[in-house]
Amino acid sequence: MFVSTNSRRQRSNASRQLLQAGAIALCLFGGAACQSHEALQPQTETANSSTSTSRVSLTDAQTGRAYDVFIYDPSPDSAASKAVIYMTDANANFWTMAQSLTDQRKANPRFSVGALVVGIGYADDINVTQARGLDLTNAPSDIELPDGFGGDAAFRRFVTEDVKSWVAANHAVDPARETLFGHSFGGLFAVRTLIEAPDAFDTYVAASTSLWWGEKSLLRQELAALGNFAGDQSRPRVLLTVGELEEVRTPAAAPAKPKSDGPPPLPGFVDRAQVSDAKELARRLNDEHGIPTELIIIEGEGHMSVLPAAISSTITFALSEE
C-alpha cells in the first residue's frame, strides 16, 4: 500500500469552488438531515460547442427513474478513442471535474491524451438529497435502515450497463481506460461497485468514502466477497483519498441522543472515523485481495473542502499510464 500526504503547498491550483455543495453538503456526508441500451429513452439534450459539454436525460426502463447524464469532451474534434472518467453526484461536482481536467491538460503535456468526463446526476427539479440517498447506498443484511436508502444495486446496473452502453454508442471511447469516481456516499458506491462488479471499470477512485454506513458493514462483511486478484494482470487499480480533518468527532462534540424534532443519525454516522477506516480499507485491498491501492491523505482539509484536491488527484491517477 502506498500512503501519501498531500499538503496545501503540494497541491495544484485546482478551483476551490464546490458548485452547489453548500445546498447538499450535509447530505453528501450522510448526516441526520439526509433522511438494455435500446431500452434507454433519451428525452432532452443540451450542448455548448464552446465548452464541449452536453447534458442528456435518460430513463432507466427497469425502474422508470430518469437521470441526467453530463458529458464533457475537451477535444471534440478528435476521433481517437478516449479514456472516460465516470462520476456520481454530477449536479454538485461535474464542473469542478471538467475544469480540473482542462487545467491539467494545459499544464501537463502527459495529460494531452483524449479523455471524457461523464457525470450521472438528476434533473434540476429532482430532490437530489433523496435521490442520491437511495442510489448510492446499500442495505446491509444486519441493519435496519430508514426509508429511502439501500437502492445501489439498481443504480449500479443502470450505470454499468445502460449509461456505459449509451456513451460507447455516441462517443469514441477506450474500453480499457474507464474510471469510476465517487465522493462520500459516491465513494461508498464506487467501492461497492469494485466488490460487486470489479471488471466494470479499470480504475476506481473513492474519495472521503462513507465507510461508516451501516455500522461499517462494508468493512465488517461485504469486502470479504471480493476475490483475490494476486497475479491477475486484469486486476483494477484503486485510489482512496480522504481529508486529514475527517476523522471522528470528539465525544464532547457528538450528540448524546437524537434531537426530538429531527430524524436520528444514519446508522454508523456518529462513530465515523474516516481516516482510520480509509487506512484499513487500503491495507485490506492490497494485502488480502491483491489490488494495487494508493491512499492519499490530504492535509488540512475536511469532508467538503477536500473535493477540489481529491478531484485533481483523480485525474492524475486515472490518466496515468501505470
Image (spheres, helix red, strand yellow):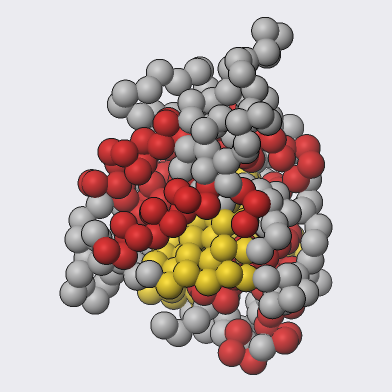
Residue 59 seen by the camera: no
Relative to 138, 123 lies left or right: right
Identify the image quadrant of the N terminus. bottom left
Query: Measured along the vertical axis of the image, is residue 305 above or below residue 98?
Result: above
Residue reaching furthest to the bottom: 109
| Residue at 70% in and 60% down | 300
> What is the total number of numbered labels drawn onto the structure image?
0
Location of residue 104 (image quadrant):
bottom right
| Residue at 78% in and 51% down | 19
| Residue at 79% in and 66% down | 15
User: Could you say where residue 159 lies in the image, as x and y percent from the top left?
Assistant: 46, 49
User: Could you say where residue 196 lies in the image, as x and y percent from the top left?
Assistant: 31, 48
Query: Measured along the vertical axis of the image, is residue 238 above or below residue 134?
Result: below
Location of residue 118 (image quadrant):
bottom right
Between residues 226 and 241, which one lies in front from this camera angle? 241
User: Could you say where residue 113 lies in the image, as x and y percent from the top left?
Assistant: 57, 85
